[in-house]
Image: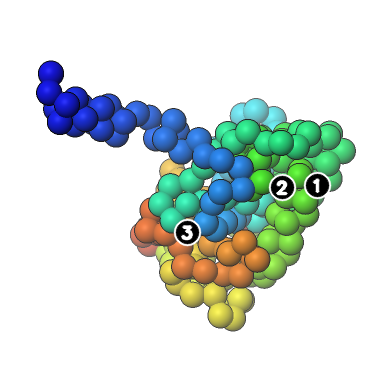
Amino acid sequence: MSRPLLRVLMLLMTLALPVQAQQRGTAGDFDYYVMALSWSPTWCALEGDASASPQCDGTHGWVLHGLWPQYERGWPQDCHSAYTPPSRAQTAAMADIMGTSGLAWYQWNKHGACAGLPPRDYFALARSAYDSIAKPTAFERLQRPIELPASLVEDAFMQENQGLLADQITITCRAGRIQEVRICLTRDLDPRQCGADVIRDCTLDNALMSPVR
């Protein structure tokens, strides 16, 4: 086999590798963060109730799904961390904004370790990111399930956070419901333009949004 042909075959094999294998990444080597705010009633209706998650016993609205290190295209995950994994006390301390300590532990292992920070600092940064974005109170006051355009949720967040632009935020849906608000942030937690692979706005005009329990 000729060398040029061998190189082509090796390139094709590399491109055929699973995305996760290509994205494993090195802790601390990333471009920006994506903060995902999950609408808890949606997660509980689709998953949490079936698993009897304690998150669904509380009165959660927007919970922090995660603060994810991101490349300009793609993302690292499952990075090796030089730091000791978070303690139970550290993950339990995040339950007020993440719903459960289990989610905090899972998010550290999958995404947080890629930030290149000790768990204490990563969780403090995640809380700062969560606190830096005002959540529209109208959704917390819903009395019954409603259907609404997903774009209305995006507009409400931009109105509540002056300076937040449409290319810095995206709304996702799942099973016809409002699922998450995802906001792109610099390492200093300032809003910034999202990568093209992050901006995948839900286009539903009748997305279901259930009230906080």
Residue 205 at x, y = what percent? 38, 62
Residue shown at 15%/31% (left/top)?
4
What residue is drawn where x is 68% and y is 36%?
81
Say which residue label 1 marks: 120
Nearer to the camera, 143 or 75: 75
Q: Which residue is mark 3?
A: 171
**Is residue 23 left or right of 56 when viewed as pictured?**
left
Q: CA distance from mark 3 to mark 1?
A: 29 Å
Chain-order first, disc 3 or disc 1:
1
Q: Position of residue 96 (x, y in %)?
A: 79, 49
- The residue carrying pointer 3 sits among few (fewer than 14), some (14 to 19) or many (20 or more) residues within 10 Å by Cα, namely many
Position in image of residue 186 (x %, y %): 58, 64
- Tag shown at residue 117: 2
Closer to us: 126 or 80: 80
Is there any visible trace of residue 18 in the rendered image?
yes
Give the secondary structure at mark 1: helix
Tell which tag, 2 or 1, sits nearer the viewer.
Answer: 2
Crowd around label 1: few <14 · some 14–19 · many ≥20 (10 Å): some
Picture quarter containing residue 21? top left
Seen in the picture, residue 135 relative to 46 is either above or below; the reply is below
At 29% from the left edge and 34% from the top edge, which residue is drawn? 15
Q: Residue furthest top?
A: 1
- Frontmost of labels 3 and 1 is 1
* Residue type for callout 2: Leu
Residue 75 vs residue 51: left or right? Answer: left
Which of discs 2 and 3 lies nearer the camera? The answer is 2
